[in-house]
Image: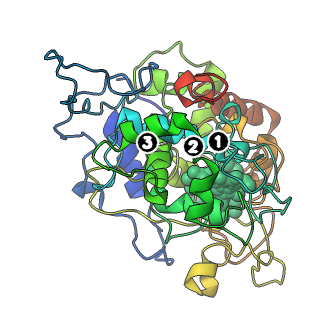
């Protein structure tokens, strides 16, 4: 692999380890308080999966995520074969995602989860699904500044991309207690502040899909050891399994960076990557294979929880953010945590406008101006790396070419991630 990012000295070793090394190197330089479980030491990790599962060239992405094929040659009908072992189809440089021990991956579970994710019956008036706010063609966002629930209630924050969500060390814009996709799914289903899907409870949820025989087959295949598999627990496990397959890492940038294809991205995009390193200093918070320092995966001994104030607001001279969007402070109660949010992934960032937790910046050019000013609001709480830098039109164009190179178009159109009710 050839050298990259000549102006950026903060790059780790080349290749797959680079991503992890950088995420782990992203600690506060000045002793400023970091979220409780701070980044773990770089030398204690390995991104090379030593898991006993087969190599990463499998079929999760190729349309074969249906029920595991019958490989039985005995023909004995009441002795079903064990399900096929799950094989990740991971892009080069990607470590194996963390999967909770009580919810192992299976093709049948992923398929059930996909049906549930796209099922509008799972909402108060039958018009909303997870996919309403997490649209595949928009990298699983919704294009709105702030999400709108089934009753029209406005969420304080914007829908987040679910691309590479399997690798998120915490979920939502600033919630250090939400680390579990299975648990998270209950939030939009039953939440009342704000209402998202507007379901009442488990019985309400199950009643809405009770009469559909498609689900009899899907639940039975997904939970073959369970005599009565229709439950909230199965629903959330299946949705989480589906979400873990939303993986993107085959963008032009990856072909250049991880595979050494010099022609994969333009000279402008390469200059943009240099600017991203310096003077942008963006890599501190936004670089590794998942483009966020809130990244976790199998084999990492600790879950890094990182939240930063990027200087979007200072309403009272002391750094106040708008009520309801105080960031990490809502959980910690610590005034120093005002306005601290998770660094969102920049994967497929050209598809996910508008930007920031409240959608308050319309364009990527606007985001660049915000950073070049060291944060659009001058606030004492801004992260120390929010430093001003000169930004001219050529630099903006280079940054934009770099951003575009991060888009993996496959994830926007992959049929195994699309609506199974309209495109089986
Ligand atoms: C009304 C729109 C809406 C619906 C419906 C919705 N979401 Fe979300 N989703 C959001 C918003 C807004 C956030 C950010 C939440 C926050 O920061 O408080 C989010 C965040 C997430 C996250 C965390 C993403 C990250 O990067 O940390 C996951 C996972 C997620 N949603 C999954 C789901 C699932 C599964 C469903 C269906 C059961 C669903 N969502 C339904 C709007 C929605
Ligand atoms: C100190 C850590 C940090 C640094 C440095 C940083 N970011 Fe961010 N970035 C964040 C956080 C945190 C957010 C979300 C802030 C919010 O919504 O309040 C964010 C949001 C973004 C977004 C919007 C993403 C979305 O989905 O809405 C983009 C684009 C972005 N950053 C690009 C950059 C670029 C380009 C640079 C360098 C010029 C940079 N960032 C430097 C932490 C950082």
Within 8 Å of ligand 1, the CB of disc 2? yes
Foreground residue among 6 and 396: 396
Residue at point 40%, 70% (across, down): 38
> In the structure shown, which secondary structural element does the residue marked by tag 1 occupy?
loop
Q: Residues within 10 Å of mark 3 (few under 14, many from 20)?
A: many
Q: Is residue 94 above or below residue 369?
A: above
Asked if one can make out residue 12 in the rendered structure from this viewpoint, the answer is: no
- Which residue is identified by label 3? 219
Whether pointer 2 and pointer 1 mark residues with C-beta atoms closer than 8 Å, the reply is yes
Q: CA distance from mark 2 to mark 1?
A: 5 Å
Whether pointer 2 and pointer 3 mark residues with C-beta atoms closer than 8 Å, the reply is no
Is residue 213 rendered to the left or right of residue 134? left
**In the picture, which quadrant includes the N terminus?**
top left
Foreground residue among 350 and 266: 350
Q: Is residue 242 above or below residue 38?
A: above
* Residue 125 x, y percent position in the rendering: 79, 53
Residue at point 48%, 74% (across, down): 35
Indicate which label's residue lies in the foreground, 1 or 3: 3
> In the structure shown, which secondary structural element does the residue marked by tag 3 occupy?
helix
Q: CA distance from mark 2 to mark 3?
A: 11 Å
* Residue 19 x, y percent position in the rendering: 40, 43
- Which residue is identified by label 1? 119
Foreground residue among 163 and 69: 69
> In the structure shown, which secondary structural element does the residue marked by tag 2 occupy?
helix
- Which residue is identified by label 2? 116
Asked if one can make out residue 276 in the rendered structure from this viewpoint, the answer is: yes
Foreground residue among 129 and 31: 129
View quadrant of ligand 1 = bottom right
* Residue 16 x, y percent position in the rendering: 33, 36
User: Which mark is on residue 128?
Assistant: none
Q: Residue furthest top?
A: 263
**In the picture, which quadrant includes the C terminus?**
top right
């Amino acid at each position: 692999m050839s050298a990259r990012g000549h102006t950026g000295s903060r790059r780790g070793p080349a290749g797959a380890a680079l991503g992890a090394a950088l995420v782990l190197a992203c600690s506060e330089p000045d002793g400023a308080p970091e979220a409780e479980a701070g980044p773990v030491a770089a030398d204690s990790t390995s991104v090379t999966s030593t898991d006993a599962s087969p190599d990463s060239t499998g079929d999760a992405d190729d349309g074969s995520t249906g029920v595991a094929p019958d490989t039985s040659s005995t023909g004995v009908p009441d002795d079903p074969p064990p399900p096929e072992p799950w094989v990740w189809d991971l892009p080069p440089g990607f470590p194996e995602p963390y999967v909770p021990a009580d919810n192992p991956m299976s093709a049948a579970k992923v398929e059930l989860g996909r049906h549930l994710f796209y099922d509008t019956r799972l909402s108060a008036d039958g018009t909303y699904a997870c996919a309403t706010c997490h649209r595949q063609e928009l990298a699983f966002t919704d294009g709105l500044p702030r999400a709108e629930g089934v009753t029209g209630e406005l969420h304080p924050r914007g829908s987040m991309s679910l691309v590479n969500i399997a690798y998120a060390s915490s979920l939502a814009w600033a919630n250090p207690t939400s680390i579990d996709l299975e648990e998270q799914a209950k939030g939009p289903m039953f939440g009342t502040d704000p209402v998202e899907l507007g379901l009442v409870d488990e019985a309400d949820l199950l009643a809405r899909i009770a009469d559909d025989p498609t689900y009899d087959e899907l639940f039975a295949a997904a939970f073959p050891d369970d005599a009565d598999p229709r439950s909230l627990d199965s629903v959330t496990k299946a949705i989480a399994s589906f979400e873990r397959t939303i993986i993107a890492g085959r963008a032009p940038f990856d072909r250049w960076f991880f595979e050494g294809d010099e022609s994969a991205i333009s000279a402008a995009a390469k200059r943009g990557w240099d600017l991203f390193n310096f003077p942008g200093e963006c890599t501190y918070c936004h670089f590794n294979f998942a483009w966020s320092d809130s990244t976790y995966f199998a084999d990492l001994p600790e879950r890094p929880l990182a939240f930063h104030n990027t200087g979007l607001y200072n309403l009272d001279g002391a750094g106040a953010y708008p009520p309801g969007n105080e960031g990490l402070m809502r959980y910690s109660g610590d005034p120093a945590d005002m306005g601290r949010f998770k660094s969102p992934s920049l994967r497929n960032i050209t598809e996910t406008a508008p930007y920031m937790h409240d959608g308050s910046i319309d364009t990527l050019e606007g985001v660049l101006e915000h950073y070049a000013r060291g944060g659009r609001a001058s606030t004492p709480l801004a992260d120390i790396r929010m430093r001003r830098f000169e930004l001219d039109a050529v630099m903006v164009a280079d940054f934009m070419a770099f951003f575009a190179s991060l888009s993996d178009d496959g994830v926007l159109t992959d049929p195994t991630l699309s609506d199974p009710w309209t495109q089986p």
